[in-house]
Structure formats: structure tokens, C-alpha cells
Image (cartoon, rainbow, N blue to C red):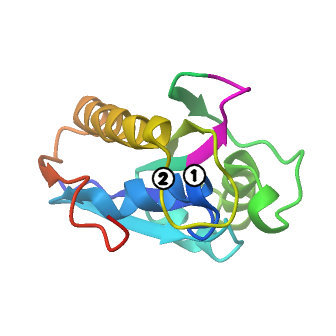
């Protein structure tokens, strides 16, 4: 049995903590997980989702929304138009469902950040959240797929460290 798993980290790496999603995606190293780091969610990602069994979305959120890493199971919902970074993963799932008649199991991990100014470094709060997100993704993948075994992940050796 071969499971297809995708992790999509999104955000702007030039806006400090907004780059959390991409940082997490780039740090993931699973044997059977495709990791994608993008600036924003776009309709073109629907094709990849139509060919996967499990998807994990990773993004930053404002510390004022939550001081903890948030993990949410997702279902398709078309209440938002996919228009840049403001797109919601649920909208992308709804688009996938509408175009391909299929929607993978999905999770959304939101990591709190405090600094969204121009810059390429994460705040200490965001760095801690990245480590927690990596652990949570490992648990999600292990508990939702019997055919995926994590190899490793690293929060070091990033070009901005």
C-alpha cells in the first residue's frame, strides 16, 4: 500500500514570522511525504491535492489569535475566493472537490508569530512554534497513514540561520 502525503507550508519569507509555513515545509524530511513551500495558496495546487491521500497545511497566525500552535482537521468550504495569501485551505479543498470530485483528508497547523515586519529571521516565539509544528506533523502523519515512516526533520541548516 502506498499513501500519498503532501505538506504545504505557505507564507512570505521576507516578512519575518510570516515565513513560518515555508520554514516548516523546508525542514520536513519524510520518506513518503512531498513537502511544498509556497508564497501563497493558488488554484494550481488543486491538481496535487487531487492525487494525494493526506494534506497538511502550515501557516503563521498572529499571536493575538492564539499563543499556542493550533491544529485543526479541515473539510472543504467555498466561502472564500482563492485570491493570494488570504486564501483559506478550505477553499482550496473545495476547489479540488469541485474540479476533481475528490478531497483528501486535511489538517491545518497554524503557528503563532509576533513579528511580521520586513526581515528574514523568525522571532524566538516563532522558532519554538516551528519545532512544535514539526512534532505535530510527525504525529499526524504517523497516526493517519500506516505506510509513511518519518526519516527526520531539522530546524537547523536553513539559509537564514
Query: Residue 153, image x and y in percent?
Result: 19, 52
Left or right of 18 on screen, residue 137: left
The C terminus is located in which quarter? bottom left
Q: Is residue 20 above or below residue 126?
A: below
* Residue 62 magenta-highlighted: yes
Q: Residue at x 48, y 62 (%)?
A: 22
Task: Indicate the quadrant where residue 63 lies.
Answer: top right
In-front residue for pair 93/135: 135
Left or right of 127 on screen, residue 91: right
In-front residue for pair 57/94: 57
Magenta segment: 59-66
Badge 1 marks a residue whose secondary structure is helix
Task: Indicate the quadrant where residue 42 lies.
Answer: bottom right
* Residue lying furthest top: 67
Query: Residue 57, image x and y in percent?
Result: 53, 49
* Residue 71 magenta-highlighted: no
Q: Which residue is drawn at 18% across and 48% down?
A: 148
Query: Residue 137, image x and y in percent?
Result: 34, 39
Label 1, label 2: how far apart the Cα atoms are: 5 Å
Q: Which residue is drawn at 32% across and 74% down?
A: 159
- Residue that carries the numbered disc 1 in the rendered image: 17
Q: Which mark is residue 122?
A: 2
Dot 1, how many residues are within 10 Å of its Cα: few (below 14), some (14-19), or many (20+)? many
Query: Residue 16, image x and y in percent?
Result: 58, 58
Amino acid at each position: 500500500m502506498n499513501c500519498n502525503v503532501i505538506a504545504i507550508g505557505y507564507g512570505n519569507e521576507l516578512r519575518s514570522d510570516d515565513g513560518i509555513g515555508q520554514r516548516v515545509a523546508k525542514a520536513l524530511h519524510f520518506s513518503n511525504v512531498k513537502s511544498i513551500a509556497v508564497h501563497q495558496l493558488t488554484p494550481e495546487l488543486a491538481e496535487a491535492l487531487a492525487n494525494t491521500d493526506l494534506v497538511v497545511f502550515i501557516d503563521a497566525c498572529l499571536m493575538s489569535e492564539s499563543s499556542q500552535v493550533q491544529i485543526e482537521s479541515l473539510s472543504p468550504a467555498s466561502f472564500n475566493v482563492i485570491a493570494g495569501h488570504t486564501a483559506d485551505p478550505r477553499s482550496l479543498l473545495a476547489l479540488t472537490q469541485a474540479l476533481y470530485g475528490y478531497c483528501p483528508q486535511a489538517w491545518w497547523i497554524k503557528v503563532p508569530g509576533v513579528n511580521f515586519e520586513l526581515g528574514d529571521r523568525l522571532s524566538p516565539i516563532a522558532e519554538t512554534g516551528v519545532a512544535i509544528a514539526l512534532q505535530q506533523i510527525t504525529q499526524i502523519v504517523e497516526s493517519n497513514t500506516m505506510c509513511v515512516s518519518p526519516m527526520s526533520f531539522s530546524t537547523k541548516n536553513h539559509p537564514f540561520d
